[in-house]
Amino acid sequence: MIDQKQLRALSGGVPEVIIEILEDFHAEAIETLAQLEEGCLESRFKEAAGLLHSLAGSSGTLGLLRFCEEVRSWEGECQQEILPKDTVPVLRNLLEDSVKQARAFLENGCLEAE
């Protein structure tokens, strides 16, 4: 699920700019998820929570609602020193789906449904 209103507002009539930012976020998020996986394996919960917090903020700003909500949920778990092993694969799949949805929305005339 994406926030179409947020994406439309961010695009300011130039969706190509947000697509580029979205692609940059995607690349950085993949790297962050790799760091998160490493932190989970080593039980570095405080570091993992910080990584999740950053992902939540950036994804929320970009209108990636479902991904943001899931990341915030895992952030709360992490603060309680709980982080299941399947966290990163779940988040990676959700990231891919969210970026794909946002990109499709932006590429397919996000300005039409004002």
Image: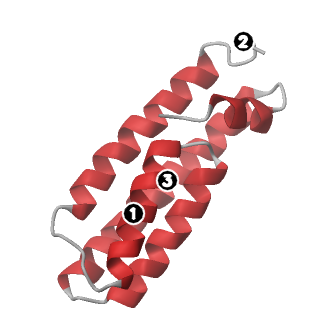
Q: Nearer the viewer, mark 3 or mark 1?
A: 1
Q: Give how far apart the Cα atoms at labels 3 and 2 are.
A: 24 Å
- Residue type of the residue flagged with mark 3: Cys
- Residue type of the residue flagged with mark 1: Ser
Identity of the residue drawn at 45% across and 44% down: 66
Q: Quadrant of the C terminus?
A: top right
Identity of the residue drawn at 63% across and 24% down: 106
User: Residue lying furthest top in this view?
Assistant: 112
Q: How many marks?
A: 3
Instruction: Indicate the position of residue 36 as horizontal and vertical percent values.
Output: 33, 73
In the rendered view, does 25 fall on the left or right side of 77?
A: right
Q: How is the image coloured?
A: secondary structure
Quadrant of residue 10 within the rendered picture: top right
Which numbered marker is on residue 73?
Answer: 1
Of mark 3 and mark 2, the one earlier in the sequence is 3
**Residue 31 visible somewhere in the drawing:** no
